[in-house]
Image: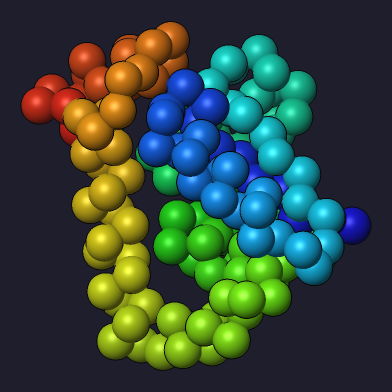
Amino acid sequence: MALTVYYDGSCQLCLASVAWVRRLAWLGEIRYVDVSDRDRFRRAASDLDWDAVMKAMHVRAPDGSLHVGYHGFRELLRAMPLLYPLRPLLGLRPLAVLGERVYAWVARRRYRWNRCEGACAVHASQGGRGEHP
C-alpha cells in the first residue's frame, strides 16, 4: 500500500511542494489527492474533515495512520532517499516543535504568497489578511 497525500490543489505553493515531492520520492508509490474540490474530496477521503485538510497537508501511511502538517512532511521523507537521513533528526523534540510552528505559520499565510482561485480564494477571503482561518 502506498502513502497518500491530501493537498490543496488550488494553492500554488502546495502544487509546487507536490511537484518537489514527486521529483524526490523514488522509494515507493505515493498517491496524490487534490482536495480543493469538495465532491472529489468526499469520494477520496470521506473519513477526513475537509476544513482540516484545507488547513494542513494530511498524509496517510500504508498502515492507515494519519500524519498532519509537519508530521506529514516527515512521513513523506520515507519515500525520498536523498532526504530520508533527515527524518530521525527532524523528529527530535526541539526540531519537531520548531518544524510544527514553521509549518503552521506558512500554512496560515500561504494564500498571500500565491495567486489562488476556487476553494483557495474562499479560504483566503475568510481568513482576512491573506491568512487561512
- Front-lying residue, 91 or 9: 9
- Front-lying residue, 11 or 96: 11
User: Residue 23: where, in percent of width, then height?
Assistant: 65, 53
Residue displayed at 70% across by 40% down: 32
Q: Is residue 126 above or below residue 17?
A: above
Quadrant of the snapshot with the N terminus = bottom right
Q: Is residue 133 visible?
A: no
Asked whether, in this view, residue 73 is left or right of residue 97, the answer is right
User: Residue 94: where, in percent of width, then height?
Assistant: 29, 87
Residue displayed at 43% across by 10% down: 118
Residue displayed at 30% across by 76% down: 97
Q: For residue 108, which quarter of the picture?
A: top left
Asked whether, in this view, residue 47 is left or right of residue 130, the answer is right
For this orientation, the residue located farthest to the left is 129
Q: Is residue 81 above or below residue 132?
A: below
Asked whether, in this view, residue 57 is left or right of residue 94, the answer is right
Q: Is residue 93 above or below residue 31?
A: below
Q: How is the image coloured?
A: rainbow
Q: Is residue 95 above or below residue 38?
A: below
Q: Is residue 112 visible?
A: yes
- Front-lying residue, 27 or 90: 27
User: Residue 87: where, in percent of width, then height?
Assistant: 55, 81
Residue displayed at 22% across by 39% down: 109
User: Residue 104: where, in percent of width, then height?
Assistant: 29, 53
Asked whether, in this view, residue 128 is left or right of residue 133, the answer is left
Quadrant of the snapshot with the C terminus = top left
Count of residue discs: 0
For this orientation, the residue located farthest to the right is 1
